[in-house]
Amino acid sequence: MSAPVTAVPPAPAGFDLAAERARTPGCATGHHFNAAGAALLASDTVEAVIAQLRAESLHGGYEAAKLAADGLAAVYTRTAGLLGVDADEIALVESATAGWQRIVSALRLRPGDRVLAARSSYVSSALHLLAAERDTGVRVEVLPNGPDGATDLEALERALRTGPAALVTAAHVPTSSGLVEPAAGIGALTSAHGVPFLLDATQSLGQLPVDMTALGCDLLIGTGRKFLRGPRGTGLLAVRRPLLERLAPQAPDVRGARWTAERSWELAPDARRFELWEAAHALRLGLGSALADLHALGPTTVFGRLSALAARLRERLGAVPGVRLTDPPAAGGAIVTFVVEGLDASEVQRRLALRRVYLIAVPADHGRWDMEPRGLAKVVRASVHVYTDDGDLDALVEAVAEIAADAHGTDRAASAARAGATAATGVTAATSRPPAHLPRARAARTPAAGRRDAVVVGLGVHGGAALRQLAERGLDVLGIERFPMGHDRGSSHGATRMIRRAYPHSDWDGLVDTAYRAWAELEQAAGTRLVDVTGGLYAAPGERSDPLRGPGCRAVDREAAARIFPGLRLPEGFTAVHDPAAGIIDARATLRTQLALAERAGATIADRTLVTGWRPDGDGVVVRTADGEVRARRLVLCAGPWTPYLVPSLTAHLTVTRIVNAYFAADPAGPLGPGGLGSFSVDLPEGLLYGFPAADGRGLKAGLDSGPAWDPEAPRPAATDAELALLARAVKRVLPGAGPVTESLTCLYTMTPDRRFLVGEVPGVPQALLASACSGHGFKFGPAIGAALADLVCELPRPDLDFLSPARLVPGGAR
């Protein structure tokens, strides 16, 4: 059986999941399961770092450090409170490894000294010990594990009784699994034998209770970037008294020592003797902010939440066919590891990233003492945090189910459906191959008498995406555009477009999810960023009969909307939907990128070429242009406003509308900039007002989703004073900080009565496919629709697109 789709266990009393996600911007960029590597930062933490850097730029580094003295001191206090020690037993370092190396070096290990190391030890720690063994004669003894996969306490006690030991060390939680070592048991034994116990708490701080007194550890290292949710480049070292007085750094620094005479010095009386003078104060203040957040939530609350989440994830992944959990019986806490049988863990990681599910693959050489005896070459590691919700868990489990089904040749659609996933993503050419009668590679092409495999007419966002997909699948494809590339006559021009998950009906959810994955794949292929996640608010009168909703979205009232986007003021009686994953697409770069990738893959592009008509021709088509005829097996029409001219049977069902957009003067650092606004829409009497913050140096961009019917062949004058006045009134109503219009542009929407797209076969002509009538909201689906068209050309079924079939508009056609 596949894993059931069920909700995350209830959050502890007093825990506000929505608030945690709202203050974690990264929740909007995907499904993040890498808290054990580098957790998502809270917005307060980011602001603490930026504020200190800003202070350094204004006042100078030394002066800014003096101004921040109280905040820096608080970092020690908060760390000490978390660990149950005194603030003077804390040192702040650059990383856990830096702390490890300084403290182990301070132990002054000598030839013959025994170091008892748990198999959970991290690679950097193990390498340091092995180097000491090789270079100084230290004896490193790796402790065995018990049946539960944790350090065998009886074996440890026997080792301690065998003879003197200089150090015992273990990782509280290793990098390679969800194991939780019996740290308190280890500490009790080392205390009884008078041996220092160094606990690597890198993976446990912030997810498990870590009280050094209760655990009996004398030395502890940790990092800020993992479950503590601090910035990278921060770490900590704790040394309890009386051991502190006996340890001295091998290389004293002016921060931790005072030069008292020509050949003498005094160490600082506290743990700061292990610190360096040069430090990133901004990062430390960010760590302090993260620690304050943890204290506010309560470490016990966090521990309970994360343990319940990971237990549920472990259960669900364990039920997916083809997936094997690799955590030992002693696992707990927030980490879950697994493998997909037959697939390298790094390949699983890559395929998950295409779906915007982010985690990491851990190779054996990062934890060889642990993984090698268990026969593991590499594992996939997922780790949850307080911002993880049931949508994240669903996304991970469903994606793993799809990947496992693909790997084992099982029915992918059925497996995906069982796991709650979209049946057909159509995102990558790697999962969609042409049928036997179409060429599978360029070397295999045998076009008959100049007959191409496919012709794409119209190279806006959908045509460009289809052209790229077809070319990358090895087809001989021609793209035709009637105007010069980059023209402003159709529907794809302009600088920006919106992307969002909020739609009024669940029919859209699968395609929305596919679109987000397709954008990620396009960005990866192009090596450039095309989508900027800003979050979005979509508002309407409270009595609206078809309110927006969608995965990860939540309804908010007028007051909550004002807190999310201070630059937006909704009228009385309005409510909104907050979509944290919404954002802004770089439209120009997208068009360039798709066509460049298409040409790189071998597509031919003919712009300034007018298509005057087309007709079926046996099992193919003939396309007439001003320069002659082109024959092809398949025709893909992405002609936007010109669709009625090329498919007359649909003319009565399509309306082409003139739309006006304008830029309004606005300070990008003010409430109408990215700090106070994201993408938005408000359903006003004048029409649907939509827009973006002043983020590109041109001001606030806004438009009204209404306008007069327009013939695309007619001249299209610039926006009139009346059109701009109407738009300006709507803007002033909800964006009071907007200034005057600075520039404007027009475009054409091609609308269907139900405002749903047309994607599929031209009614009655299976050789021709259509993508059009995208009703003002189609750009966000561009790469996904291009992949869908390529699937259909290659005769791969796409039942997920049936709700967009052109046949629904034709009497007697399928719906």
Image (spheres, rainbow, N blue to C red):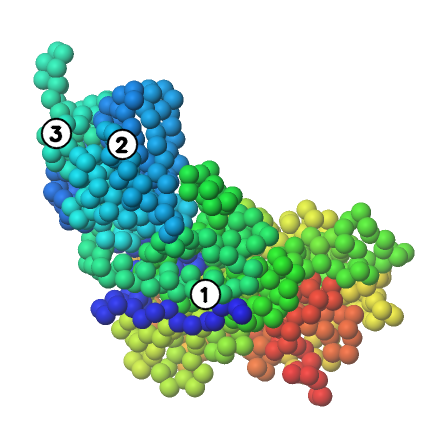
Q: Which mark is residue 245?
A: 3
Residue flagged by tag 3: what amino acid is it? Glu
Q: Which mark is residue 162?
A: 2
Marks 2/1: CA–CA distance: 45 Å
Picture layout, residue 735 above or below residue 78: below
Expressed as whole percent of the image width and height from the top left, the position of residue 772 reads: 64, 71
Give the SS element for disc 2: helix
- Tell me the residue at 71%/88% (across/down): 812
Q: What amino acid is at disc 2?
A: Thr
Q: Give me the residue at 20% from left, 30% from top.
A: 274
Name the mark on residue 316: 1
Q: Position of residue 160 (x, y in %)?
A: 25, 35
Q: Residues within 10 Å of mark 3 (few under 14, many from 20)?
A: few
Q: Position of residue 609 (x, y in %)?
A: 75, 58
**Residue at horizontal 30%, vertical 75%?**
558
Q: CA distance from mark 3 to mark 2?
A: 28 Å
Which one is earlier in the sequence, the residue at label 1 or at label 3? 3
Point out which mark residue 296 bears.
Answer: none
Above or below, 413 against 451 in this view is below
Q: Secondary structure at mark 1?
A: helix
Mark closer to the observer (3, 2): 2
Give the quarter of the figure containing the C terminus: bottom right
Q: Residues within 10 Å of mark 2 (few under 14, many from 20)?
A: few
Return the disc, 3 or 2, that comes first in the chain's sequence: 2
> In the shown orientation, is residue 414 left or right of residue 135?
right
Q: Position of residue 669 (x, y in %)?
A: 31, 54
Judge from the rendering whether residue 116 lies leftward or rightward of residue 491; answer left or right. left
